[in-house]
Amino acid sequence: MKRQVNPEFQPVPSSRTKTPSGNMAEESGAYLWKSSIAKTGPKRRDQLAGYLTISPALLLILALTLYPVAYSIWLSLLEKHSFFPQERFVGLENYIYLWKDPEFWTSLWLGIVYSGWTILFQVVLGVAAALILNETFWGRGLARAIVLFPYMIPTIVAVILWKWLLNDTYGIVNYWLMAIGIIMDPFCWLGADHIMLSVILMSIWQFFPFVLLSILARLQTISPELYEAAKVDGASAFSRFIHITLPQIRGILFVVILLRSIWMFTKFDTVWLMGEGAGAGRFIRTLPVYAYMRTLTYYQAGLGAALAVIMFGILVVTTVIYFRLFREEADIG
Amino acid sequence: MNRWRFQRISNRILLYIGAGLFVLQAVFPFFWMVSTSLKPHVEVFAQPPSFIPHQPTLDNFKRLFTATNFLTYFRNSLIVSGLAVLLTMVVSTAGAYSLTRYQYYGREKIAGLILCTYMFAPIMVVIPFFILVKKGGIENTHLALILAFTSFCLPFTLWLMRAFFKTIPVQLEEAAMVDGAGRIRAVIYVVMPLALPGIIATSIFTFILAWNDYIFTRILITSDELKTLPVGVQDLFHSALIDWGLIMSAGMMITIPALLFFVTVQRYLIRGWGAGAVKG
């Protein structure tokens, strides 16, 4: 193992090397001595230092994330009130209850509908926007920043923005749709029939920049020569996309779809805030919202935890299947 | 040749239209928020709606600061997010240094574990977290909230800092150490100056993540004077008639800090870090 010291590197003045010049021999001697230690010794000091510096982070993750998640498995086997201390072990009763609970199956289905549509459109729009914003044009930097920005705002802001835009009496969207004659009467965006559509629309708006960002970062690493060569060969823009861009972004696309699926399927705040107060919240009661309500509306912490565990289980199983199906992409990514 | 030129120009036009549409859909809701927040009460509900307020007024903001607890929420958000970022950054800078600079058994396993927790969604953690916090007797405190924020920020921050430390050549510290500097001196004088932009950018991303949290605050905090902005603003809805002018002014006041931070770090987003730099 041969390591080279950059000769141009200016060492920071240190108390131990008082003379900046003249003791080169000594220094390189020390270097050789150190590297020979590195070659033979087990570097026990390094190991210890490594464990020492990672341990605060590791302890916090164990205590604040992994322990609660493990505890929720135990909690799902209890009948427990959310606010009072008493608890009773009931085994799998919570799971059996949920199996027979039509509300659970409805929320599972609504969650699949919600995440399916939002993921599809996020990916399509995200890739399209990334391709456009990867081209060179005037104002590109600003355009990128603006298009990314909705992803950075608190969900509550996104929700109040869209509730106001889609307001049935005073909303600007209804005003426009009526002005150009698409609809005659105000469209009840937040009513029972259309609230799913509305929450899907606003979720796409809020989250597709994540896909855009990931794809754009990858596109910038593709060598322009590939495109030049294809252009010389007379390949159309579409075939350049299929034969050059797509194979290059497959790996990151694999990761992005996985992350988006996990986060959309477990998305709580957007769905909950959109449904709250609208009176039609029941029609977008996805699994995370249902878990929240079991815990904090019905005070059944055991059932809430069981729902969280089920969600976790579904995600693990889906992820494993996903990796099996697309193993090739996983290797690239 | 003419045909080729024509196609080139029409491609440019299509490009600008496409980019314009994407910009427009992102900007318009915010424009509408600003416009509504500057309108007097009557004009908010006027039909047809006016794009630019006819009689712009700061009345909504005045009411936001005097008639609601907005400033308390704002202060709480700053304190809790700030402390959570501080704790997260100290711990994860050390952790990321460890993961990139030392060789030890189980290092890659630990890195994999962190990536795994990075994918966890808040809803899976918050229910047991809530019960544990009650058992620990710290419910309805900022301490519980800081710990909760740390729980979802830490894997993210650690992952980002690890990616960042990987870009700093290890040879630089080795050279410094060869020249007689101890490990600690090498870190302070060689690594830190190079890592500082990354540390600042990561802090800001973490801050945005914490600043935006809704679910943990909703569940862990019950007293009004301890609430953070997202929950406080949601509660403005609970009046009989929704005061959209007031709500839009509140929305603007939450968005401005996020915007300022975003402007300072947005170049990091596209240059290199990509997907790792955001979560949600």
Image (cartoon, helix red, strand yellow):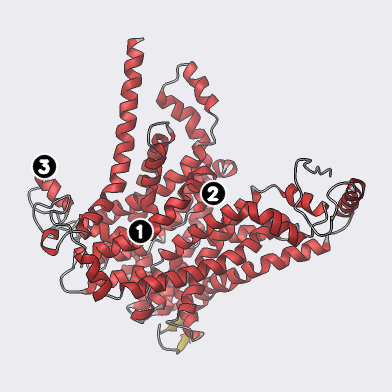
CA–CA distance between discs 1 and 2? 41 Å
Percent position (x, y) of residue A134?
44, 35
CA–CA distance between discs 2 and 3? 47 Å
Is disc 1 in contact with disc 2, using a CB cutoff of under 8 Å?
no
Instruction: Please tell me which residue lies in front, A146 or A183.
Output: A146
* Closer to viewer: mark 1 or mark 2: 1
Instruction: Please tell me which residue lies in front, A223 or A74.
Output: A223
- Amino acid residing under circle 3: Ile
* Closer to viewer: mark 2 or mark 3: 3
Q: Which mark is residue B141?
A: none
Task: Work out which quarter of the rendered image holds the C terminus of chain A and state it.
Answer: top right
- Amino acid residing under circle 1: Ile
- Amino acid residing under circle 2: Phe
Q: Which mark is residue B256?
A: 1
Percent position (x, y) of residue A59?
63, 71
Q: Is residue A280 above or below residue B192?
A: below
Question: Within 10 Å of the Cα at label 2, are there few (<14), some (14-19), or many (20+) other Cα atoms?
Answer: some
Residue at (21, 66) in percent of width and height: B60
Is residue B7 in view from this perspective? yes
Q: Secondary structure at mark 1?
A: helix
CA–CA distance between discs 3 and 1? 34 Å
Query: Which residue is denoted by mark 3 in the rendering?
Result: A180
Query: Which residue is denoted by mark 2 in the rendering?
Result: A323
Residue at (61, 63) in percent of width and height: B92
Q: Secondary structure at mark 3?
A: loop
Circle nearer the N terminus (2, 3): 3
In this image, A57 relative to A308: left or right? right
Question: Within 10 Å of the Cα at label 1, are there few (<14), some (14-19), or many (20+) other Cα atoms?
Answer: few
Percent position (x, y) of residue A208?
38, 48
Confirm whether circles 1 and 2 share one chain.
no
Is residue B105 in view from this perspective? no
Percent position (x, y) of residue B209?
45, 61
